Amino acid sequence: MQEKPLCLRVVHLLPYSMSDYNRTDFTNPSTFILLGIPGLESAHIWISIPFCAIYAIAVLGNFTILFIVKTEPSLHGPMFYFLCMLAITDLVMSTSTLPKMLSIFWFNSREISFSACLTQMYFIYCFSEMESGILVALAFDRYVAICNPLRYSTILTNSVVAKIGLAVVLRNGILALPYPFLASRWPYCRTNIIPHCYCRHIAVVNLACADIRISSYYGLFDLFSVIGMDVFFIAVSYILILRAIFRLPTKDVRLKTFGTCISHLCAISALYIPDFFSSLTQRFGLNVPLHLRILIATVYLLVPPMLHPIIYGVRTKQIRGRLLQLFTHKEM
């Protein structure tokens, strides 16, 4: 006898009856049911505590970056404009997922409409890849600042920064469209129960009773072409940066110059390492427990928006100085 899919085997964990949701007569269900983290239902409240703290830090930190850059005229430059783009992207990405997760963990509010699920899916893939594009822009900023410092202001004008930002938005806005489009085309005649805490593309299309290889192939294409291309451009930028640094006369000057790149390298690591690990374990890590795969996928979405403002707030001298100035004035 053919083995039942996991989403049917875990249905007993829900306070919903099998007859309500294990239907065979719908093509596009009106609602999906998000399980949260299957196998860890009893720990949902405890899991929600760090998740809520991460979200609070992400929102506070990114709004702080936006406030500081807006109110400090000396920070109205290319790098800080890119940081504002990154902060907005982080806010949208974390807000599109975490409030619904917390409603699952706190209030057992597992239902999500079909259209809302597809919308969440679009925002997740659009803005997570937009982060990657902005990190490429920041790598280009560092390349120009170190390799062509005298031409920095003429190369990275406000017009060029706006065009780079627009290119990042258009690229990822278009490339994320096939995810909800393909998911909306499949017939869902098995179940509408998603063994996940948000509408991840592969978790949704796995419920379809059709050959979904095109969805899986597009996900891999998107991962290795978009993210792979971004990583390639970042790597090329840093090869040129390192070559320029090694040509500097003294060790102290080399270290000081390289120190301006540390925050960017930390942000790159915070985004790409969990991204690749999550994507590969979702597709090929069948021996990895489901709850661990879901936790990895969730951490990948939540941790970068929290870390980016901390990294740039601590490592960027101008932002750190402005923060200290604000706190000093408050104390006075």
Image (cartoon, rainbow, N blue to C red):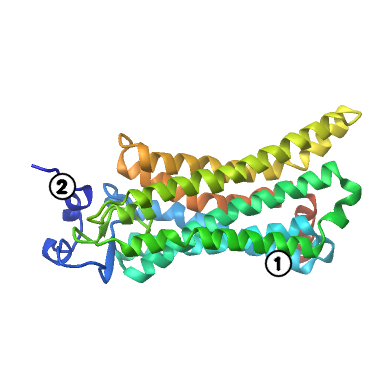
Disc 1: CA contacts within 10 A as few (<14), some (14-19) or many (>=20): few
How far apart are the alpha carbons under marks 2 and 1? 52 Å
Q: Nearer the viewer, residue 178 or 16?
A: 178
Quarter of the image where one finds residue 14: bottom left
Q: Nearer the viewer, residue 291 or 158?
A: 158
- Mark 2 / mark 1, whichever is N-terminal: 2
User: Can I make out residue 195 in this image?
Assistant: yes
Callout 2, which amino acid? Lys
Q: Is residue 2 left or right of residue 44?
A: left
Residue under the point 73% across and 64% down: 162
Q: Position of residue 254 (x, y in %)?
A: 84, 32
Q: Which mark is residue 28?
A: none
Label 2: which residue?
A: 4
Q: Is residue 241 left or right of residue 172?
A: right
Q: Is residue 35 above or below residue 221?
A: below
Residue under the point 40% across and 62% down: 180
Figure quadrant of the C terminus: bottom right
Q: Nearer the viewer, residue 322 or 143?
A: 143
Q: Is residue 53 above or below residue 332?
A: above
Residue under the point 27% across and 51% down: 211
Q: Position of residue 316 (x, y in %)?
A: 75, 49
Q: Is residue 210 left or right of residue 61?
A: left
Callout 1, which amino acid? Phe
Figure quadrant of the N terminus: top left
Label 1: which residue?
A: 67
